[in-house]
Image (spheres, rainbow, N blue to C red):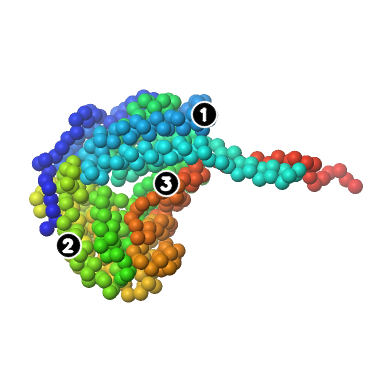
Amino acid sequence: MTNQVNDKTTRHVPAGLPGRIQHYIGGKFVDSADGDTFDVLEPVTNEVYVQAAAGKAADVDRAVAAAREAFLNGPWPRMLPRERSRILHRIADIVESRDARLAELESFDSGLPITQALGQARRAAENFRFFADLVVGQSDDTFKVPGRQINYVNRKPIGVAGLITPWNTPFMLESWKLGPALATGNTVVLKPAEFTPLSASLWAGIFEEAGLPEGVFNLVNGLGEDAGDALVKHPDVPLISFTGESRTGQLIFANAAPYLKGLSMELGGKSPAIVFADADLEAAIDATIFGVFSLNGERCTAGSRILVERGVYDEFVERYAEQAERVVVGDPQDPKTEVGALVHPEHYEKVVSYIEIGKTEGRLVAGGGRPAGFDAGNYVAPTVFADVPPSARIFQEEIFGPVVAITPFDTEEEALDLANGVKYGLAAYVWTNDLKRAHNFAQSVEAGMVWLNSNNVRDLRTPFGGVKASGLGHEGGYRSIDFYTDQQAVHITLGAVHNPTFGKGA
């Protein structure tokens, strides 16, 4: 029986919730041009707790106009990197000082356990600090041929960046895009996920307090098919950075194509965790339990397919299932909770539908639906299927919830085929004490990121992104600087000009 600590009757409501959520355009909070709103639910009871302005094309037009004015005529793109850096560091200090409040709001809005929400502000602050330092310390290429020529590279901000962010750990993932976009001198229009608009509304006050010039940051709430679509199709937005589902990424790719926009898209995942017989099983079980059940399983890099070598398969499945049953499900605000409520009833229904499919495709060894004692809210017990064939939908398709499929393999070649046998390629995790095998397997696996005997520990200087259906392009470190800037090569002749001569006759 999955552990539980409380049910919906202990629902915690943060003090000081806003009466409504508005857009933030040109330095002012505003309603939608047509006055339209949409309901925002909290996931413990699925009750409406606030209404948010529902942005449409007219609202995106206003936001883009404000951002473009700030880019063309405002001080931000023309500031020295050090001047922008000082403001970004102030933003980081303010964000970090509000960790407890942010965690409370994030947990309430998304269903994320409070202990996992705590620290999101520190991670968001670190994103700003990292890029604040990077733009000051960066150096660009210079090439010189003595006496002949010198060539150097200018980096210039591109313009208005459209940032479309997801509903899982929303505040931190917004900072992931805002940090480099602003550090490089661009202005932005942020379209947060409609399921979780609460924490995004905090950015305006933080930026104002830090001294970000008016119009540099703009926010439009709304549905993806309205506000998101209008932002992608806007002719004055040359950049779109998107994190979300692969199907949405395909639509964005198609809609942005006529404008030849720059695109950076981190999309879905069905990441494998490969456990060889020589692995430290206790460490591998702990890591793979955390890797798929933390953040309620709503994480792009979740190791939701576990491939286990036959020699340790039965032991692994038994121990894994027993530990999964002990994972504590409860109210997101309770510090004992390890898995809270899924973000929205629509997503809950999707996850539960996959569990029902899984019962026809594999052997259910833990969980399997709503945990006992939770009659309302979007609660799903940590669910484990064993003996899952690679043709199964729960093996092939992204579920984005606390559901894992375990599959045996006999040889390293079979493990590689299984790992690569899906359309996704975001992350992979390899557990083995054979150093040569670990590096060779990492080289061969089709994934943008590989963790060897570790779990999601990442240096901000490294690229983040996937291959195949998991993304287009990479961000992180200099890859973000490359995406948010134009690189201009300047060529200077130092000696005699060497031109072919046309048109002078004999």
Given contact means CB atoms under 8 Å apart, are the residues at marks 3 and 2 in contact? no
Q: In this view, does 454 lie to the left or right of 346?
A: right
- On screen, residue 344 above or below 22: below
Q: Report the amino acid beneath label 1.
A: Met
Nearer the observer, 304 or 231 = 304
Q: Nearer the viewer, residue 286 or 72?
A: 286
Identified by mark 3, the residue type is Leu
Single out the residue that lies furthest toward the right.
Answer: 506
**Cα–Cα gap, marks 3 and 2:** 35 Å
Please state which of the two labelled residues, at mark 3 or mark 1, is closer to the viewer.
3
Q: Name the residue under label 1.
A: 79
Q: Name the residue under label 2.
A: 322
> Which of pointers 1 and 2 lies earlier in the amino acid sequence?
1
In the image, taking residue 387 as reference, residue 486 lies left or right, namely: right
Compared to residue 143, the image places residue 31 above or below, namely above
Is disc 2 surrounded by few (<14), some (14 to 19) or many (20+) residues within 10 Å? some
Horizontal and vertical percent for residue 382? 20, 56
User: Residue at position x 31%, y 41% from top?
Assistant: 120
Mark 1 surroundings within 10 Å by alpha-carbon count, few (fewer than 14), some (14 through 19), many (20 or more): few
Asked where in the image residue 207 lies, by quadrant, the reply is top left
In terms of image quadrants, where is residue 204?
top left
- Which quarter of the figure has residue 309? bottom left
Q: What residue type is labelled 2?
A: Glu
Give above or below for 92 relative to 461. Answer: above
Comes first in the chain, label 3 or label 1? 1
Which residue is label 3 attached to? 460
Helix, strand or loop at disc 3? loop
- Which residue occupies 43% across, 68% down? 436
